[in-house]
Amino acid sequence: DLMLQRDERTTWLFRNSLSYQINPGSRLVGKFNHADSDSSLGTFYDGGYTEAVIGYAHRPVEHDRLNTLIKYTYFYNMPTTDQVTSQDMPAEYIQKSHIAAVDATYDITRKWSIGGKYAYRLGQISLDRVDPEFFDNNANLYVLRGDYRFRDNWEFLLKGRLLDMPDLDETRAGALAAVSRYFGDHVKLGVGYNFTDFSDDLTDLSFDQSGFFLNVTGTL
């Protein structure tokens, strides 16, 4: 007789967000996402995830052409053994990262804006779940961007990006372009192409981001 093995998994997920208006030109933002996944097969099959973010957004009322966001992120991810990425590949890394970023945009005219971003990742990764052995995976991200608004509801975006990974002795650079259309005051739909293989999000360790993308943005 064949005996079927049955296993159970219990997962707890917590999602929280924060927004506090300090004054008309400044706001604190944050979020805390946490998940625990326990398997009846043992701790080798368990998983865990934590993302904690605190940020400060500044747009001076007297000079509202300037937008600045300063953000800190703590990120921990231990994927379960059967977890896969969006490309249906096994999620391999245990990751622990501290990420600091500053992002600023300035409206030169009603049609033209320029901006820049710098982010630094102080990170570690491990390929071993049983006896984790972490090694450094630090990175610097540099981004320059330009935005051009045309007609009534259209916008063109061009970014130049450079990712420096000193621990791997590797640097990658390239561009990203997108065209977007506003629908009313609260929805923006865009399509673009990423000429690089990395993401602006330093928690993303994959290099499979090249190609076309669709982006939808909503505001309250």
Image (tube, rainbow, N blue to C red):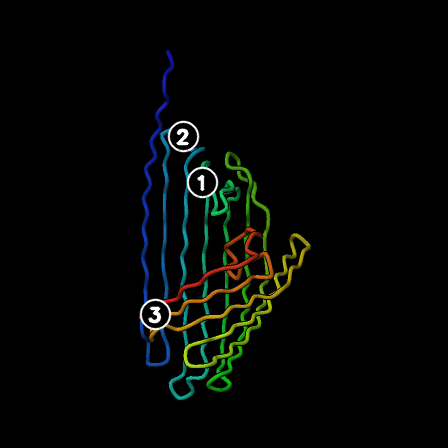
Instruction: Return the residue nearer the eye: 214 or 113.
Output: 214
Q: Residue at x 63, y 57 (%)?
A: 165
Mark found first going from the N terminus, 3 or 1: 1
Instruction: Return the residue nearer the eye: 68 or 131.
Output: 68
Is residue 54 positioned above or below 36 on the image? Answer: below
* Residue 42 numbered tag: 2
Determine the CA span between mark 3 and mark 1: 32 Å
Q: Residue at x 45, y 50 (%)?
A: 76
Q: Is residue 20 left or right of residue 94?
A: left
Disc 2, SS: loop
Q: Residues within 10 Å of mark 2 (few under 14, many from 20)?
A: few
**Image quadrant occupied by the N terminus:** top left
Task: Give coordinates of residue 45: x percent, y percent.
Answer: 43, 34
Q: Residue at x 60, y 60 (%)?
A: 196
Task: Give coordinates of residue 167: x percent, y percent.
Answer: 65, 53
Is residue 198 positioned above or below 40 on the image? Answer: below
Disc 3, SS: loop
Q: Is residue 87 left or right of residue 62?
A: right
Q: Amino acid at mark 2?
A: Gly
Q: Amino acid at mark 3?
A: Thr
Mark found first going from the N terminus, 1 or 2: 2
Determine the CA span between mark 3 and mark 2: 43 Å
Q: Amino acid at mark 1?
A: Gln
Q: Is residue 97 left or right of residue 31?
A: right
Q: Residues within 10 Å of mark 3 (few under 14, many from 20)?
A: few
Instruction: Return the residue nearer the eye: 119 or 152.
Output: 152
